[in-house]
Image (cartoon, rainbow, N blue to C red):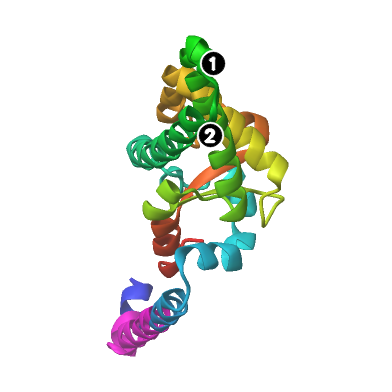
Amino acid sequence: MAKETEDKRQGPLPQLNDELYHGRLEGEAEAARQNRQKKAQKLSGQDLLLSYRRHVDRNMVNGFSRKLYGGFWIRLWAYLLDLIFVGACQAILMACLLTFLPDSYLVHWPLVTYLVGQGVLLVYFSLASYLLNGQTLGKALFRLQVVKADQYRLKFSTCFVREGLGKLILSNLPILGLLVVVSPKRQNFMDFFTDTNVVALDQFRFLYEENRI
């Protein structure tokens, strides 16, 4: 009763002050959001990740948001695109070998084809991910990037193990790719050995703009 009497005495001013206060907070939040959007628009997805990932290094490793990581299907399409490029390189190399190798090697041609194919696969994925800092042509097109918490730029050893050897194993045992579906952080089998993750750059941009990270 006393509280109701006090509210009547004060009139609508407390409620009006609360509305003004919350309105000011909403305005400040919207202004901050627009400012973050302007900053994000000036940077590519990869540059944005490199600039602000220090705020989420721990969260990335601990699974801050499952949607932050690249999903199965988009990674599959990126991988298939890379395989098309690898296949083209293999065809060119095999044509050169047919020109210069002696005829005696044709007896073992299936073995030569397999070894050359695996070699091109190993070299392409290792070098591309190292030179593009966690991206291959396929990953770059689909806005994906491999990251490691303690490496702002991936070491070649990480790229060789995670991408080179990993893709060699995956090409022979593709069933292992399904681990991405059930892993909490959408990691594949090699990510557990190299302590890496595949980040969806567009999702990272969205979370940054919305002040979620």
Percent from the top left, x then y, of residue 150? 72, 50
Q: Does the rendering let one see residue 191? A: no
The count of marks equals 2
Percent from the top left, x then y, of residue 26? 36, 79
Q: In the image, which disc is placed on residue 120? A: 2
Q: Taking 191 as reference, is 114 left or right?
A: left
Percent from the top left, x then y, of residue 127? 60, 46
Mark earlier in primary sequence (1, 2): 1
* Gap between marks 1 and 2 measured at Cα: 19 Å
Please give the residue where the numbered disc 1 appears in the rendered image.
105
Q: Closest to the observer: 95 or 8?
A: 95
Instruction: State the residue at coordinates (45%, 74%).
Output: 40
Q: Secondary structure at mark 1?
A: helix
Residue found at the very far top of the displayed protein: 107
Q: In the image, which disc is placed on residue 82? A: none
Q: Which residues are magenta?
A: 7-30
- Looking at numbered disc 2 in the image, what kind of residue is underneath it? Val
Which of pointers 1 and 2 indicates the residue nearer the eye?
1
Q: Closest to the observer: 45 or 168?
A: 168
> Is residue 173 highlighted in magenta?
no
Q: Secondary structure at mark 2?
A: helix
Tell me if residue 87 comes above or below residue 177 in the rendering.
below
Q: Does the magenta stretch mainly form a helix, a strand or a loop?
A: helix
- Looking at numbered disc 1 in the image, what kind of residue is underneath it? Tyr
Q: Taking 13 as reference, is 143 left or right?
A: right
Q: Quadrant of residue 8?
A: bottom left
Q: Residues within 10 Å of mark 2 (few under 14, many from 20)?
A: some
Instruction: State the residue at coordinates (68%, 40%).
Output: 158
